[in-house]
Image (tube, rainbow, N blue to C red):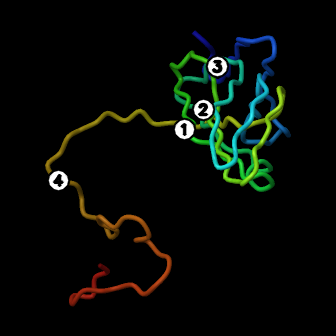
Amino acid sequence: MQPSNTFLVKKLSSSATIPTRGSPLSAGYDLYSAEETVVPARGKALIDSGLSIAVPEGTYGRVAPRSGLASKHSIDTGAGVIDADYRGPVKVLLFNYSDADFTIQKGDRIAQLILERIVMAPILEVEDLDVTARGSGGFGSTGGFGKAVKDVAGSLI
């Protein structure tokens, strides 16, 4: 059993790099590639970090893009949730939204891992939910472009 606030990391490969933080107040731990690979133009690739991890209980690891890769090279991440009970290899799904292939070198920083606290709430099935001002409004319903439409009673639709 690990201490509650300890982030455990195991190297699965000699080419793996232990995650680092860019500064003392960085939210994320940089994840590094353990292999050289190419993310094809307008394509995707699964990059191996060469690591297995154990995040503290009550948290999960969210794999997020690195801002420099996103802004300079149009590289983004996908499918990035690492549960506290997962012990397999950490791999990062990268999407290349540019028109040029993007080469990842062994040891390159490819993403960041942010530890986020979670609530494990029990599920209770109910017949009805309470009424809220927002109601069932979905995408774009809390603001945005265009005029708000009201019904005859003056309520937003």
Query: Given contact means CB atoms under 8 Å apart, are the residues at marks 1 and 3 in contact?
Result: no
Asked if 14 appears above or below 49 in the picture, the reply is above
Residue 146 numbered mark, or none = none
Q: Which amino acid does label 1 sit on?
A: Ala
- Residue sitting at 80 percent across and 11 percent down? 14
Residue 92 falls in image quadrant: top right
Answer few, some or many: residues within 10 Å of disc 3's Cα (few below 14, many 20 plus, some between 14 and 19).
many
Q: Which amino acid does label 3 sit on?
A: Ile
102, 81: nearer the viewer: 102
Query: Given contact means CB atoms under 8 Å apart, are the residues at marks 3 and 2 in contact?
Result: yes
Residue bearing the label numbered 3: 53
Answer few, some or many: residues within 10 Å of disc 2's Cα (few below 14, many 20 plus, some between 14 and 19).
many
Q: Where is residue 13 in the image (x, y as percent from the top left)?
A: 75, 12
Assign a secondary structure to mark 4: loop
Disc 1 from disc 3: Cα separation: 17 Å
Query: Given contact means CB atoms under 8 Å apart, are the residues at marks 4 and 1 in contact?
Result: no
Assign a secondary structure to mark 3: strand
Task: Indicate which disc, 1 or 3, sits on the residue closer to the N terminus.
Answer: 3
Task: Indicate which disc, 4 or 1, sits on the residue closer to the N terminus.
Answer: 1
Q: Position of residue 149 (x, y in %)?
A: 34, 85
Asked if 99 appears above or below 114 in the picture, the reply is below
Assign a secondary structure to mark 1: loop
Q: Where is residue 145 in the image (x, y as percent from the top left)?
A: 49, 81
- Residue sitting at 68 percent across and 47 percent down? 96
Residue 128 numbered mark, or none = 4
- Residue sitting at 29 percent across and 79 percent down? 157
Residue 61 numbered mark, or none = 2
Q: Where is residue 155 in the image (x, y as percent from the top left)?
A: 28, 82
Q: Where's the N terminus, which quadrant?
A: top right
Residue bearing the label numbered 1: 79
Task: Indicate which disc, 4 or 2, sits on the residue closer to the N terminus.
Answer: 2
